[in-house]
Image (spheres, grey):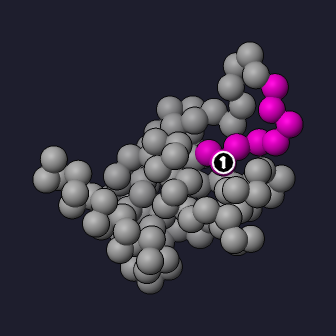
C-alpha cells in the first residue's frame, strides 16, 4: 500500500473516525478485483498500489482532493491532506469550493 504523506494544516490533528465510516475497501455483497482507497483508523488516506489507476495521483490519476471528495471525507480530513505547499492547485480549488458551499 502507498501511504500519502500528511501535511497537517490544522492544529486539531487527524479526526478519529474509523475508515468504515468513509468507505469500506470492499462493499458487502460485491466482489471487487481491485481495492479502493480508504481512510485508515488514524485518518490517513490509503491508496493501494493495485487500485484502479484512476486513483493513482502519482501516475497522472485524479488528485487526492478529488479522491477524498468522491469518498465523502469531511472538511477537516480534506484540510489535513490538501495543503498550500503539498498541492497548491488542489488547495486553491478546495478553498474556492468551501467558500462556495458556505454561501449557499
Q: Which quadrant of the rendered structure holds the N terminus?
A: bottom right
In the depicted view, which residue is nearer to us: 50 or 104? 104
Is residue 36 a member of the stretch shown in magenta? yes
Prevailing secondary structure class for the magenta stretch in the rendered image: loop
Q: Residue at 57% across / 47% down in the picture? A: 39
Quarter where residue 19 is shown: top right
Magenta residues (range): 31-38
Residue identifier under label 1: 37
Residue beneath the point at 51% across and 57% down: 66
In the image, residue 99 lies in the stretch drawn in magenta: no
In this rendering, the answer to whether 8 lies above or below 23 is below
Q: Please identify the residue farthest to the top as the structure is shown.
A: 29
Above or below residue 10? Residue 55 is: above
Residue at 49%, 61% (x, y): give it: 65
Res. 18 visible in picture: no
Q: Residue at x 67, y 64 (%)?
A: 61
Amino acid at each position: 500500500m502507498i501511504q500519502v504523506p500528511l501535511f497537517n494544516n490544522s492544529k486539531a490533528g487527524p479526526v478519529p473516525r474509523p475508515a468504515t465510516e468513509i468507505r469500506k475497501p470492499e462493499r458487502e455483497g460485491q466482489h471487487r478485483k481491485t481495492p479502493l482507497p480508504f481512510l485508515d483508523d488514524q485518518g490517513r488516506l490509503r491508496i493501494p498500489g493495485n487500485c484502479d489507476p484512476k486513483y493513482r495521483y502519482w501516475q497522472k490519476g485524479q488528485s487526492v482532493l478529488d479522491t477524498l471528495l468522491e469518498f465523502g471525507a469531511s472538511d477537516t480530513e480534506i484540510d489535513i491532506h490538501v495543503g498550500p505547499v503539498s498541492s497548491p492547485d488542489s488547495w486553491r480549488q478546495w478553498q474556492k469550493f468551501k467558500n462556495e458551499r458556505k454561501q449557499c
